[in-house]
Amino acid sequence: MNALGYALLGMLVRKPCSGYELTQLLEVFWQAKHSQVYPLLMKLEQDGLVTFVYVKQTGKPDKKIYSITDKGKALLAEWTRKSPAPPVIRDEFLAKVYSIWLTDKDTAQRLFHERMTAYEEKIAFRKEEIKKMKEEYGDEIESITSRHFGRYLLFCRKLKQEEEEIAWCRWVLGLLAK
Amino acid sequence: MNALGYALLGMLVRKPCSGYELTQLLEVFWQAKHSQVYPLLMKLEQDGLVTFVYVKQTGKPDKKIYSITDKGKALLAEWTRKSPAPPVIRDEFLAKVYSIWLTDKDTAQRLFHERMTAYEEKIAFRKEEIKKMKEEYGDEIESITSRHFGRYLLFCRKLKQEEEEIAWCRWVLGLLAK
DNA sequence: GGCAACATGTAAGTAGTTACATGATTGC
DNA sequence: GCAATCATGTAACTACTTACATGTTGCC
């Protein structure tokens, strides 16, 4: 089993979800397309780690709601205890920054402004998500006993990181203005 | 051409390097194994974007030093101007944090302590690299005219981010201690 | 009338990892 | 004697992306 498989189990232990929803929830720490998620869910189902039920909807397409099994939960708990592999970061923007001295100031400034705008949107979304979580789950969310604790921690981390990114962009734009 | 190819060109426009060295330099914004880098460099050479010379060494294996061509430089400059694809982050540790509520406090604390230790080492390395760059290239490094400007910006960003990671870990450990 | 969101899937291709292969030198 | 660093390469495999395929509702 690969890390994405465990990541999906980790989402399902929090609450039952459709493949579509999982793909979106995953965004905080892993990026995967639905074309990778759907076949993996089928494999997890074959391995007896998850089960699903069809849910009919009106006005929307029907969906499959997946839930984790005890076997899946046990496997996940075991995996969580092991030391994780080092993170993978592949950022095209940073690759462009590396050779920024090749371009003119205007292009450099444009690239950094675009980055800032993208991150400002992410921050707004992140803040709203944190607010929603606090409203829905209360103070309990800051305790390891809550099943939403992990997601909450990751959102707080992401928010801080995104704010840092903007501060860095501002610093660079300052250097470019000199 | 894929992003890794451009990333390699971006490194080579700063200074000529061996494949081995490129693999290490890449670490700031892209992680690639030598088994991916060597064949790509050959492909870049076939496309006339880089050239290489054999350098004989004593006490160490011989190496191939790659340099960028004018064609490669032109292609890179063109690519730099285009809006980058969104970053990819795949972090197994964060996947484990997501389901941290499944494990006991001791395991949770151990995971966070391990993360902190790993990041403290990275910070030490990063600080030394920044110091070296400042010594070698002086104040000029904070100007877009320096070919080391991009690398300097990325190291400063990474350092900040790694310090933030430690602050976040400390915050989580505080919550866990409650 | 077209696009976005909801919802699931497959096929073909590219990108990236793991393992194999070789070999000298330095330090523990 | 063993592991690490330097140095380059290939083969087999896995992971991931892009494109194709289908269909509804609601909004501009």
Image: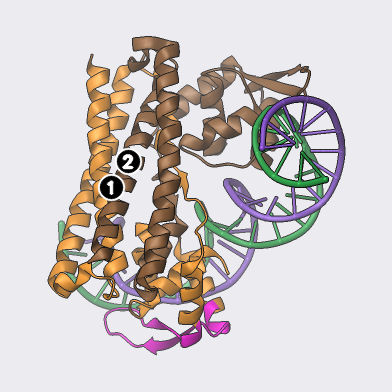
Chain colours: A orange, B brown, C purple, D green
Quarter residue A150 falls in:
bottom left
Quarter residue A126 falls in:
bottom left
The amino acid type of the residue labelled 1 equals Ala
**Magenta-colored stretch includes residue B133:** no
Residue A125, percent from left and from top: 21, 56
| Residue B125 in sight here | yes
Residue at (28, 58) in percent of width and height: B172
Q: Tell me the number on the disc at residue B163.
A: 2
The amino acid type of the residue labelled 2 equals Glu
Residue A62, percent from left and from top: 36, 82
Position of residue A135 relative to residue B85, above or below, is below
Q: Which chain letter goes with mark 2?
A: B
Label 1 CA crowd tier, 10 Å (few <14, some 14–19, many 20+): some
Position of residue A120 relative to residue B38, above or below, is below
Secondary structure of the residue carrying tag 1 is helix
| Residue nearest the viewer, comparing A74 with B123 | B123
Residue A170, percent from left and from top: 22, 30
